Amino acid sequence: MPFESDDYLSRHVQTSEVDLSSKVDELVALATPSNSPNLALYREMLSTVIHMAQADRNRWDAKIMMQTLREMERAFGVLEQLKRRRKVTVFGSARTPADHPLYQQARELGALLAHRDLMVITGAGGGIMAAAHEGAGMENSLGFNITLPFEQAANATMRGSHHLLSFHFFFLRKLFFVKEADGLVLCPGGFGTLDEALEVLTLIQTGKSPLVPVVLLDQPGGSYWEDALGFIRRQLGDNGYILPTDLNLMHLVYSAEEAVDEIARFYRNFHSSRWLKDRFVIRLNHPLNEAAMAKLHADFAVLCKEGGFTQQPHCEQERDEPELCDLTRLAFAFNGRDYGRLRALLNVVNEPENWAT
């Protein structure tokens, strides 16, 4: 989404007793490289802080803003060093004991993900989180801890790691769980795990988070996720609270190997996606053949507000990502609503028989 300046903030700074607008410009110029494309954004951030200081809100509000900015800046610095590596977030109970089959399964999951050169993100605690990091090892692990009066200590794999970040607020921690994830695996857990599962699905369903594979992992013979899916089908689906295709956003498996294979299949041809104004662009490792394009037009035309699907090279609007310029683009005027059907489209895109040779 293109940046739009908040004129209200600028006017507030300019009309105060002391004109701080020029001071903000000076500070931005001193602190920011002259060729930065983010100059306007930094100016807006500073104007926002000044606006809050002028309003002199209560101390709790000020502390929330300070802590949020501080934690985000530190997280961005650490994660910048890892931006070229794909990552998978693993959710699950912190209370799963080490002798439980789910613990062994999560440890196997971590090892298999690391073998595919995928980093493993968890909340850095015990239980499922500790198991996944044990399997992946320290160099392939990333931990987002939360400061709590209990269960807050980092697990043995993450303790002392440069890949460990601590958060005071749950909402910030959850932001990074999703922002950094190229895939998500959800193991059985408590209220926190269910909260994370439903938030992830809501963000993807509404287009607030990019489409990534969401895998529900249970032990063989387990019914945790099957029971949850039964409730979703009966109460949400049958009552029309979600689209029938929304169930495509998640995939249930019963082994660590199946979970990793599902993530790998998602990226066989699909690379990434983004909006270019009113056009949705899917970047592909391989262009699609004519038969595949015909299938998209026949089976997925409902996704298009107008026109159809076209394949094209990168365009000038994507100059901020030059490393992706060689990838083919599948572009269309996406309705922005049915992400479950879009997930089904990606299954077609990822089948090798649909690639141009």
Image (tube, helix red, strand yellow):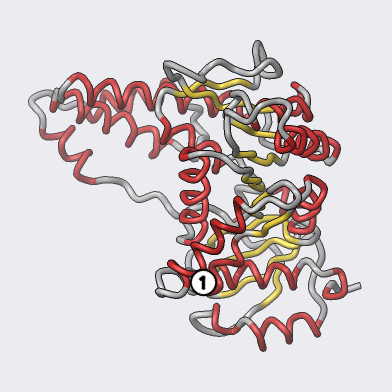
When the figure is inspected, residue 321 is found, relative to residue 339, above or below; the finding is above
Image position of 142 (left or right of 278)? right
Q: Residue furthest top?
A: 160
Q: Position of residue 224 (x, y in %)?
A: 60, 50
Residue where numbered disc 1 is placed: 338
Q: Residue at x 68, y 31 (%)?
A: 82
| Numbered marks: total | 1
Viewport quadrant of the N terminus: bottom left
In this image, 142 relative to 201: left or right?
Answer: right
Q: Is residue 253 left or right of residue 73?
A: right
Q: Residue furthest left?
A: 17
Identity, as a three-letter code, of the amino acid under mark 1: Asp
Which quarter shows the C terminus?
Answer: bottom right
On the rendered structure, is 172 left or right of 130?
left
Residue at left offset 38%, top offset 39%: 40
User: How many other residues sit within 10 Å of disc 1, few (<14), some (14-19) or many (≥20)?
Assistant: some
> Which secondary structure lies at badge 1?
loop
Q: x, y percentage for residue 347?
A: 73, 69
Estimate the x, y position of residue 96 in percent, counting from the top left: 63, 30
Determine the residue located farthest toward the right in the rendered image.
Answer: 357
Front residue of 248/330: it is 248
Q: Position of residue 294 (x, y in %)?
A: 73, 86
Residue beneath the point at 73% across and 60% down:
270
Q: Nearer the viewer, residue 284 or 132?
A: 132
